[in-house]
Image (spheres, coloured by chain):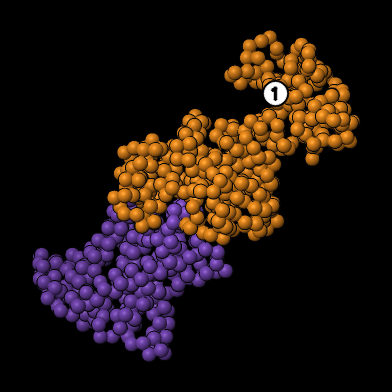
Amino acid sequence: MTMRGTSWRTAASALYAVLVYGFIFLPVVVLVLFSFQDGRFPIPPFEGFSLRWYEAVLADSRLMEALANSIVVAVGSSLVAVLLGFLAAYGLARFALPAKGVQRALLTAPLTVSYLIIGMGLLITFNFIGFPKSLLAAGIGHVVINLPLCFAIIYSQMGDHQANIEKAARDLGASEWQVITLVTAPMLWPALFAAFFLSMTFSWDEFIISFLLTRFDVTLPVEIWSLLRSGLNPKTNAVGSLVFGISAVLVVVLELVVLRKGRRA
Amino acid sequence: MSATAVDVKNVTHRYEAFTALADVSLTVPTGSYTVFLGPSGSGKTTLLSVIGGFLVPQAGSVLINGADMTAVPPAKRPTTTVFQDYALFPHMTIGANVAFGLRMRGIGSKERMRRAHEMLELVGLKGSEAKRPHELSGGQRQRVALARALAVEPSVLLLDEPLGALDLKLRRQMQAELKAIQREVGTSFVHVTHDQEEAMAIGDTIVVMSHGRIEDMGTPERVYLKPATLFAAGFMGQSSFLKGKVRWRTGGRLDIETPVGRLPLPLNGSGADTGDDVVLSIRPEHFVVGAVEGAALSLGSATVEDMTFAGAHHLAVMRHETVDSFRPMVQMPQTGETTPGTTVALGVLPEDVVILKDDS
């Protein structure tokens, strides 16, 4: 009786788990599967395995250009967001500033604002000051969305113990600049790295801000969106799979380098 | 080099309503080992911060080697600090930690590695250059912190409760080593602690602090045997206190009325005068137990309430036969028949009694 009850419950749990993971991953699996479709339509039945759509993607100069743009925007905006987030965290953690709590709240507040609103706000502002739509404008948008995240991650890792270590460095003759570059930043290396890679993944996937703020040179998600307007074909699946693959690689690198290291220390 | 390493003049510092330092003045002679001793909140760590440059006092000045350093930042002072939590650089090797100060002074890498090697040898950690702080034990990290602070050859080395995090045995061992290292390098050491045994074992000079003031300052022997204040007598070692009043003073002698009777005493360095309220302080080992004869003054008799074995001797807490407020703490022999409940006669040699002003 109990045996049967238990196995029945186990089976139900297993089924539930399959449904949950299916719900999450089925779209991605279908996307990736039909990127290998040996036919003209990314819909069942699966007609055979082929890499021709990947060849088509790699041969498409516009897609390749957008890919390069996306990498430049992701790396550039993430570097700036990490740098600004680090300096803001250092300032707030180490100096007596007026209305500290308010300043911290203001820095993290954009996390709660939708990308659409941020994108529209930037579009209107840039229009007003005559700043042209460009990759730089999109990059600035990505700094706006990633700076609060970088700040929050880095600030959470700045403790009093580290403040004492910085004090020791000053005592031994280090200037403020030397304290930051030789002691504070290296000590926070895992947090800086985590902030950088998370920013990269967010910037890499981001569509709406890039869509609103770019014109001639666009990022990969915007270029994919243009492709989709002319209808589905396995090529869009192939490029989507590439975007997903690169995101997955970034997350795996983050896990291996930062989180493993944190566990060891 | 001037004979005075540190000269603190009338330093006062308040944190809102709390007075951390109240008009503190003191000098640290060059090449000496000075210990600031006091309970937490006594101002000893604040005073160390003022000397190290981490805190600019609201009033008063600090001279180091004769130069005014009151508002000079730590980096530009000839002082370095060994922090309580060691504050080693976790991302650097031990060698790089020790050489850090030399690097900040623009000394080439070959020379600084040579000096780091020397320093690590001095503190007994030869050959650990390539290790990282997390690979070392607490005691070893302590040594690295010491080597790092000494590597830049400061005029004054400041140690903020450096042995606080170590277990008792290691602490006693490190005390001896700190003292030996100080003798070897000849740098002036200023050491903060709340442990009176540590202070006595290590210091050339002990500065006893309480409530932001210096209560007493002198050699360990002097502060122990002739404490200047009631607080110093109570904080440095154990003491039994007996209140009294000076009936009269003639020449070098005092006649003091106490609950246990009139005691004729020599001045013993006290400034007490006719009519003053005083407290007599007697160390456990200064009581004469049993046969009170010769020069010893009788203090009446007392009953043993509790005995604690302290290895080399027993320590008895007693209840006086006639005076409830007098609870003598008396050192008794290592072996003997005395047990709780026994009543014994107590006495003391006149020159062993410390006469203190009653400021309670």
At x 26% / y 80%, what residue is drawn? Answer: A218
Instruction: Name the element at disc 1.
Output: helix
Residue at 89% across / 36% down in the picture?
A: B275
Judging depth in this view, the residue of A2 and B234 nearest the camera is: B234
Using the image, name the chain to which the residue with label 1 belongs. Answer: B
Three-letter code, disc 1: Pro
Q: How crowded is mark 1: few (under 14 residues within 10 Å), some or many (20 or more)?
A: some
B215 lies above or below A214: above
Q: Colour of chain B?
A: orange
Q: Which of B135 and A125 is in front in this view?
A: B135
Colour seen for chain A? purple
Task: Give left or right: position of B130 versus A65.
Answer: right
Nearest the eye: B40 or B120: B120
Q: Can residue A208 be seen in this view?
A: no
How far across and down, in percent of the image, does residue B245 sit?
86, 32
- Please give the name of the residue rendered at 71% of the width and 28% of the height, measured from the top-left corner: B239
Q: In which quarter of the image is residue B203?
A: top right
User: Which quadrant of the view contains residue A236?
Assistant: bottom left
User: x, y (%) of residue B111?
Assistant: 31, 49
- Residue occupied by mark 1: B284
| Above-or-below relation of A73 to B48 | below
- x, y percent for residue B301: 80, 17
Extreme residue in the top direction = B337
Q: Is residue B249 visible?
A: yes
In the image, is A154 to the left or to the right of B163? left
**In the figure, residue A144 lies in which quadrant?**
bottom left
For the C terminus of chain B, which image quadrant? top right
At x 78% / y 16%, what residue is drawn? B295
x, y (%) of residue B3? Answer: 56, 46
